[in-house]
Amino acid sequence: MKFADFPQAVINENVDYTVNEITNVIKKYGPRESGNSNCFAAQKHIKKELDTFCDETSFEEYKMAPKAFLHFTKLISSAIIIAVIACAILVYLQIISFLLAQCIVGGVVCLSLFITGMEFLMYKRFMDPLYKKVTGHNLLGVRKPSGEVKRRIVISGHIDAAYEWRHIYYSRKHPIVGILMGLTIGSGFISFGLAVAAVILSLTTSSRLPEYFYFFHYFTALMMVTLFYFVDFKTISPGANDNLTGTYAAVSALRMLDMAGVDFKHTEVCAMITDGEEAGLRGCKQWAKDHYDEYVNSGVETAVLCVDTLTDLEYLNVYNRDMTGTVKHDQQFSQLVKDAAAEAGHEDLKFANVFFGSSDAAAFSQAGITATCLAAMDPAPADYYHNRRDNYDRLVPEAIKTGFDVVLSTIFRFDEIGLTDAPEKPAEKKEKAEETETEE
């Protein structure tokens, strides 16, 4: 079947279904912190829905530390503030030398930057051993083909919601968010550089100039106060858009196929509802690890389309770069999604980069599994992003419908040509050629 032949009434009904279901989930199950009982209860609710139009549904458990991903902001900010103030006092009291003070502050800032890079830039489970573990769950619903499984497409969305980011809630879309974050990160790098320079100059000259470098550390400590209050761990976003819209894109994809009586001959279609995305992609990282052979070495051509926030229609794009631009998604599959969007009448989708943060798709691509991301969110960021404004009154049915169009069209196109038969685009060939030249 082509997307053009699919009944629009089914899509419209599922948009209404999604809006009602998201409202119901938020009202009935409350805050869905990664790995908590509300998350699991909402997943069990969805499983009952999936049971009515899937051949198989199942849960898989895993362990995660939900606070490890972002609680480091409080640890490193506290450590830097204490180091700067304590060392200043100890130098004043002549208990330690200025040189030792700079070494201590520089060391603490360096360690803090390293932790930030490991957690927020690379999404490593670096701090997890220090935090309490809880049980998370990934839910999978499967619609099997009538014949042998030769292709598998997984539509994925995460059900957990984020801790509130105070900067965004109180400033809305004011540039102060970017300014504060830029100053916080930048001051850390400058402090480290000045500490190193001060140590070198203290050892090689008799100048008092290095002593004045210490004054900048006070500014860095001040910026760390804003970092300390950045995340409110007591307030959980309702997560209506981020990411119940993605969750129900996966659910509704299978529901729409069932309602329209669409059965594929060789393509298996799956809905994956993950937990732990807001805890550092923990759910998808575990799934990618456990199912690598099935998704890569089984002989079944497999691709994962992660849908994350269908709200700001003007920013609906295929995100072929992820994790602050450090992870590249499969270009052929990304192109297939973009072409499928054009077939559904949405020619304006572009390739884009998740330049701050990450989506679940990055966990799959990092593991070597074919994946890409579809999202529609203002990267400014949106004023509802990771705060209490992300409620069901902020849903945008038109954006949800457009996202559903793209997801359905992607499924049909993947069933028709898959990846091995998909033609390479000139841009892709050029990119591969450039990569080859670089390697040489």
Image (cartoon, helix red, strand yellow):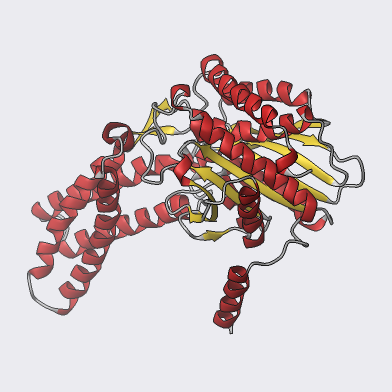
Q: Nearer the viewer, residue 345 or 100?
A: 345
Can residue 3 be seen by looking at this rendering?
Answer: yes
Residue at the extreme bottom of the image, as rendered: 440
Q: Which of 421 and 213 is in front in this view?
A: 421
Horizontal and vertical percent for residue 215?
Answer: 12, 56
Residue shown at the point (76%, 33%) measured from the top left: 257
Q: Count how many numbered circles sit on residues in the image.
A: 0
Q: Toward which corner of the image does residue 344 lie, by quadrant?
A: top right
Q: Nearer the viewer, residue 359 or 414?
A: 414
Q: Toward which corner of the image does residue 9 lie, by quadrant?
A: top right
Residue shown at the point (9%, 63%) measured from the top left: 212
Horizontal and vertical percent for residue 334?
Answer: 62, 56
Quadrant occupied by the N terminus: top right
Horizontal and vertical percent for residue 25?
Answer: 57, 20
Can residue 132 be seen by looking at this rendering?
Answer: no
In this picture, is 252 found above or below 220? Answer: above
Q: Which of 68 and 50 is in front in this view?
A: 50
